[in-house]
Image (cartoon, rainbow, N blue to C red):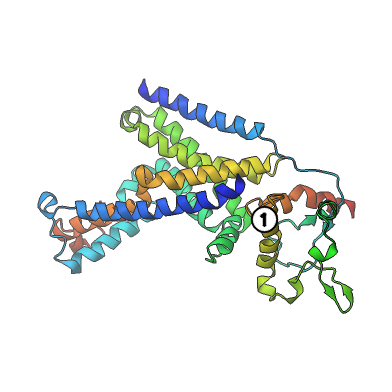
Amino acid sequence: MLDFITGPLFVISLVIFTVGMLARVVLYVRGLDWRLERIAYRYHTDRSIPGALASIFKWLIPGGTDGWRTQPVATTLFFLLHFGAVLVPLFLLGHTVLLERYVGISLPSLPGTLADILSVLSLAAILLLAARRMASPALRQLNSRADWFILLLTFLPFATGLMARLDTSAYQSWMVLHVLSGELFLILAPFTKLSHIVLFFLSRAQIGMDFAIKRGGATRGGAFPW
Amino acid sequence: MREKHIGFRTILTSLLFLALGMALSSGVAFGEERIPFTYPAFSAKKMPPVFFTHDQHIAYLEDKGQDCTACHQMTDEGLSETFLNVRNVAPGKQMDYLHATCTECHVKLAKGPRLVDCRVCHSERIASEYAAKK
């Protein structure tokens, strides 16, 4: 079973993830309507491109925007989750060894202790963000089934990965569950709100272009307080 | 009301996963004779060193009618003490070579840890057990 889930099933998951995400990008761009949104996307590239880049860049920085600064606790938890969620899957030593052997891509790896810390912080952030969602009446209204589902999809690879990391007598069972939950994440990402992995960049770019082209963002040197 | 229901289901699913993991126990054997992999001497120490179940491998190979040359090459000075061709592999490629040759055999025979089972071979417990014995 292990050979199947780490071999063919892993390749299938990666293909679904990659093709699905590319499809989401294409559909997003094709879904833009300059008449509906009243943005002349193709014109004013001197303003729109820097605007798009500034919007993406500022939202990637903790506290880089008003939106981040008004909710410091949520922002902190959000970034703790995302540092681990981006760095650990790509740069954990165990993952880079597999990637090099099976795909031929050689990536640098995180020191083991740092990877441990990032993973624990991510898992803690997921649990605290879940607690926040349940505690706040506004978030209880806003959060849908889909929002909870992607939190679970993210929780499982971290939880099973850390259980495997503990190197208990059930190590290989945890590893099977870890691989399966990681593949579930990859397969479902394009069809769920996890598609924000790529769509974040597109929606930030779109809003950045909007504000730079027609709302005076470009006149503020990229410091428009969105 | 709906949100409470989903929250409960989230927890329930996690617990089921946890229980499944506990139930599927692996058969890592203990107390058997192991020898450390000393060549090549990796300096980075990123993972615990490998203590190899030599006796277990001999027993398995004997069962299959194979001898030492399955893993040790014959040289002018006699049987090589190192694994297969690892001495002739470029230093930067030796780890990859060992990972590849060990796990290819395991995959082929559908037995033993695969590349994804990092800590079956690189076990902190076993490494510290052997360090204490020294």
Q: On the image, which quarter does residue A100 sit in?
A: bottom right
B6 on left or right of A32: right
The reply to whether residue A194 is visible in this rendering is yes
Residue that appears at 66% across and 43% down: A172
Q: Position of residue B50 (x, y in %)?
A: 76, 57
Q: For the point 79% across and 49% down, which residue is it?
A: B126
Is B111 or A97 nearer to us in this picture?
Answer: B111
Residue pictured at 29% horizontal, 57% vertical: A55
The quadrant of the rendering that contains the N terminus of chain B is top left
For disc 1, the neighbor class at 10 Å (few under 14, some 14 to 19, many from 20) is: few
Q: Residue furthest bottom?
A: B76
**Residue A161 percent coordinates (x, y):** 58, 45
What residue would you read off at disc 1? B108
Q: Indicate left or right for A194 with A212 as reference.
A: right
User: In the rendered image, which quarter is residue A45 located in?
Assistant: bottom left
Q: Position of residue A178 (x, y in %)?
A: 57, 44
Chain for disc number 1: B
Which element is circle 1 on? helix
Q: Residue at the top extreme?
A: B1
Q: Is residue A48 left or right of residue A133?
A: left
Is residue A59 visible in the rendered image? The answer is no
Percent coordinates x, y for residue A141 in the rendering: 31, 28
Decide which of B88, B65 is in the foreground and name it: B65
Horizontal side of residue B13 vs A15, given as left or right: right
The residue drawn where x is 49% and y is 54% is: A11
Quadrant of image for the C terminus of chain B: bottom right
Count of numbered badges drawn on the protein: 1
Tell me which amino acid carries mark 1.
Lys
